[in-house]
Image: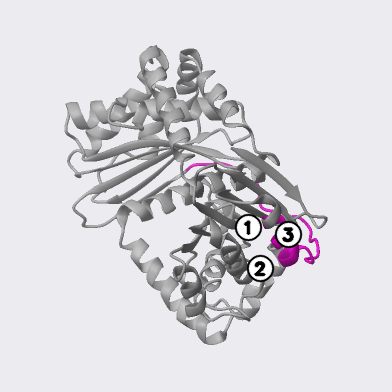
Amino acid sequence: MTLRLTTLPNGFRIVTEHMPGLKSASAGVWVMAGGRHERPEQNGIAHFLEHMAFKGTKRRSSLQIAEEIEDVGGYINAYTSREMTAYYARVLEADVGLALDVIGDIVLNPAFDKKEIEVERHVILQEIGQALDTPDDIVFDWLQEVSYPDQSFGRTILGPEERVSAFTRKDLQGFVAEHYGPGQMILAAAGGVDHDAIVRQAEAMFGAMTPTPASTFQPATFQGSERREIKDLEQAHFAMAFNAPGYRDPDVYTAQVYAMTMGGGMSSRLFQKVREERGLCYSIFAQSGAYEDAGQITLYAGTSAEELGDLTQITIDEMKRAADDMSEAEVNRARVQLKAGLLMGLESPSSRAERLARLLAIYDRVPDIEEAVERIDAVSVHDVRRFAGELTSADTALALYGPVAAAPTLEDIRKRLVA
């Protein structure tokens, strides 16, 4: 693999990784402007803007954007996260130039046609409605909200209906002007790519952009509270979050190993104890999420109203027990799972391009894979036990949805954690 990085005079960065033997490539532009960069009155606009990118430019209609990529057998898409918005395509190596031309066009020259704005507004409102009708999705939006109340980091990425219904062409243009500067963009490509050719094309497309001040955002402070939405559903949806390390914290890999041991697979503690031994649920998992200045350990389960109390107690007791008897075998299994997931993901040019952009945004460099593997291997049983003990006294948030009137409260959970 050959990783190369070039920074244009205006701050625009190009990072590529050639993968010998591959006849395809993934390429895109990652913009460091996501949900957390929105002011309260802008909530949902980063996602709206992502949708509008495919609704036509000064050179192409929305149909032409789709046809040019699909005529060569390619795939184009985008997503909005809390910290970034990405526009990317997967094509054969001979069509990388075409993919970048289309992506550059939709990022730099969106038409923001008023008619298309109204069409896409309706689509997004349908998307919001669909999310509200998907309990095991919406409960995580609520969990984020109660983890970071009254903060940009806690607001939904889709935005509330009233905001989405009011966005104008001027609002979209204003967000682009504020956050889509060359220093906030990274062009990342992996697979069958030619770095020098991509740099030449990037210079032609992005080199004349004027530098803008770096995007700012409200710092995230985990506070933790509870949201309980009672509804006549078949299942009770239970989601709990704990304050955890951000991605620059030395403990970030400890948090990942801990989450894997607790609920990262079929051999994990919670899956075995709650599902396999007791049959209290179909789905239960734990995961670790890390961001620039914040992190969370999240646990989720879907169960019946009658089983929710027992499920909650067992989950808390297993968390407490991990601080005392987490074994070397469990930690080793989690380390291997994390490394395997990391290395298997790197066989995909799409995953590799996303990794390049994400790590460059985080560290202003792309650490070697070996560095991540070494940090995972360095996590010891002692580290995981210590982390497990600290987590029982960490700030906690709780979101419940469905037949949850009799479910334990956040205060009940906190008392049992420290008992």
> 208 or 167: which is nearer to us?
208
Q: Secondary structure at mark 3?
A: helix
Residue 201 image-quadrant placement:
bottom right
**Disc 2: CA contacts within 10 A as few (<14), some (14-19) or many (>=20):** some
Give the CA distance from mark 3 to mark 2. 28 Å
Local SS, label 1? loop
What secondary structure predominates along the stretch shown in magenta?
loop
Q: Tell me if residue 282 comes above or below residue 370 in the rendering.
A: below
Residue type at mark 1: give it: Ala
The answer to if 163 sits in the magenta stretch is: no
Q: Position of residue 32 (x, y in %)?
A: 64, 54
The amino acid at mark 3 is Arg
Residue pictured at 56% horizontal, 71% vertical: 53
Ranked by sequence position, the earlier of labels 3 and 2 is 2
Eye-nearest disc, 3 or 1: 3
Residue 49 drawn at (x, y percent): 57, 69
Decide: marks 2, 1 in contact (CB < 8 A)? yes
Residue depicted at x 38% and y 72%: 126
Q: Is residue 216 magenta?
A: yes
- Which residue, given by chain and number where applicable, does mark 1 sit on? 33
Placement of the N terminus among the 4 image quadrants: top right
On the question of residue 372 being in view, the answer is: yes
Magenta span: 198-224
Where is 71 relative to 96, above or below? below
